[in-house]
Image (tube, grey):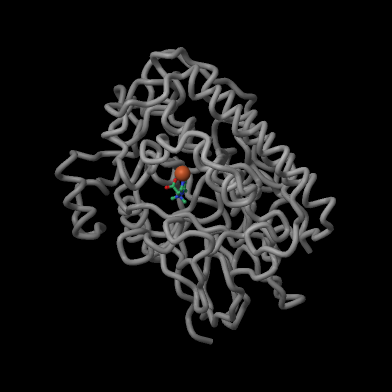
Amino acid sequence: APGTDPGVLRRRATDALLRARARTRLLTGCVDDRDLTAQHSPLMSPLVWDLAHIGNQEEQWLLRAVGGHEALRPELDPLYDAFQHPRAARPALPLLRPAEARAYVADVRGRVLDVLDAVPFEGRPLVESGFAFGMIAQHEQQHDETMLITHQLRRGAAALGAPEPPPAAPDAGALPSEVLVEGGPFTMGTSAEPWALDNERPAHHRFVPSFFIDTLPVSNGAYLRFVEDGGYGDARWWHPEGWRQVRAHKLVAPLFWRRSGSRWLRRRFGTVEPVPPDEPVLHVSWYEAAAYAAWAGRRLPTEAEWEKAARHDPVSGRSLRYPWGDADPAPEHANLGQRHLRPAPVGAYPEGASPLGVRQLIGDVWEWTASDFLPYPGFRAFPYREYSEVFFGSAHKVLRGGSFAVDPVACRGTFRNWDLPVRRQIFAGFRTARDAEPA
Ligand code: AVJ
Ligand code: FE
C-alpha cells in the first residue's frame, strides 16, 4: 500500500519536484533560444510557454494556495492561462524571454522548497499527504511529456539522446496472443492513493463481462499488414468521422511514417530509420486504432476492461496499484520516465506483467480505449474544475497506461489521460479486445 508516513511523503514530494525540474531543464536546455520561442507545430505551444506556465501553476498552487504568499507576478497569470489562449495563438503573446522564464521558474521553486519544509502535511485537504506538491510535480511532468512531443514535431538535427530500451523477453514469441479475463466485479479507481487526481476517484465496484485482451500492444508489423491490405482505402473499417479525416488529410499510415520504395521509414527526434516491426505502433489517432481493430475482427477495450486487465488479481480479488503489484515502478517493470526515447519491443518487461500475463500495460505507449472521458460515480472536482471536469463528455477518449515519456509520478493503474480522437502527435498506440462467448 502507498506509504503515508509524513516524513516519507515529504521526501517523496521533494524528490518528485526535483526530478521534474531536472527533466524540464533538459528539455528546455538542449535547444537554442530561437527553438525555444518558435512554434514547431500549430498543435503545440512554444517550449518557452510551457516553461513559464509550469512556474506559474506552481506559483498559484504552492506559493499562493498552500503557502499563503502574495502573487509574485500577477500580470503573468492571464498569459499562461491555457484556457485564455489556444496553443496556436501563444507565440504572438508578450511571453517572457527564455532567460526571464528560467529566472521566474527558479525564483518560484526556491520559495516553494521553503514552503515544503515548513507546511504541515495534515489538516487541509489540499496539503493532506503532500497532495498539492504531488499534483504540481505531476503537472510539470505532463508538460514535460508535451514538450517532448514538441521535440518530436521539431524539424532539424537531434537535440536529445538516450540509450536503447531492453529487447523483447526470450519467451515473447511463445506468448498466447490474447488472455481471457473472466466476467465479474472488480474495484475501479482509487480512494487510497494519496496523489491520485480527482478523475481517478473514488474507488467503486464495476461488473465487467468476460472478455479477451491482447497480451501485447499492437506492433508496427501487425499495423503494417492493415496498411498493406488497403486499410486506409476501405471505408468499412472506419468511424464516419475517421473516414472523413482519412480523405481530408490523405492519411495512408501513422504520423511520421514515410514510404521509400518498398520500405517504410519513420522520423524520430531528428533521425530517420526504417519502421521497426517489433515496436508497438505509435502516433495513431483513436480513429486509426479503432479502424485497425475492426479490420482485425476485434475492437478497442473499454476503459473498465483495460483497468481490470491491469489491476485485478483473480487470486486475491483485489485491485493492485500496478499490473506487477503494489511496488512503485522500477526500471525492470516498465519503460517510463524518458529513460529511452522510444517504446521497447513488444514482449519486453516480463517482470511488469499482470497476474494474467498481460504485458506492457504500463509504459511504452499510451493505449487508446473505446471509452469517453466521464466522471466516476461520486466524482468531486478537486482542487479545480479545469483539470478534469470541464473535459468530461463525448468529445474526448480515454488513454491508459502511460508512454515511455511519462514519469512514474504521473503513472499508475488508475491514472486517466484523455485527448481528442483525431490526435496523432501524442505518444499513443493501442491493444485490441473482443467479447468472450457466454459460457
Ligand atoms: C491530462 C494530458 C490531457 O496536457 O492537456 C496539463 C494535463 N492539465 N495542464 C493536458 C494538463 C493542465 C492535460 N492532459
Ligand atoms: Fe498545464
Residue plotted at (60% across, 49% down): 410
The location of residue 105, given as percent across then percent down, is 56, 30
The location of residue 277, given as percent across then percent down, is 48, 36
Q: Quadrant of residue 388?
A: bottom left
Residue plotted at (53% across, 17% down): 30
Name the residue nearer the viewer: 247 or 195. 195
Most extreme residue toward the front, as rendered? 70
261 left or right of 117? Answer: left
Name the residue nearer the viewer: 261 or 131. 131
* Residue 265 seen anywhere in this rendered image of the structure: no
Q: Is residue 304 above or below residue 399?
A: below
The location of residue 238, given as percent across then percent down, is 24, 57
Q: Is residue 336 above or below residue 175?
A: above
Which quarter of the rendering shows the N terminus?
Answer: bottom right
Name the residue nearer the viewer: 190 or 401. 190
* Residue 31 seen anywhere in this rendered image of the structure: yes
Q: Is residue 362 above or below residue 305?
A: above
142 left or right of 287? Answer: right
Name the residue nearer the viewer: 146 or 153. 146
Residue plotted at (31% across, 66% down): 394
Q: Quadrant of residue 77?
A: top left
323 left or right of 404? Answer: right
Residue plotted at (59% across, 81% down): 205
The mark tally for this picture is: 0
The location of residue 358, given as percent across then percent down, is 62, 59
260 left or right of 361? Answer: left
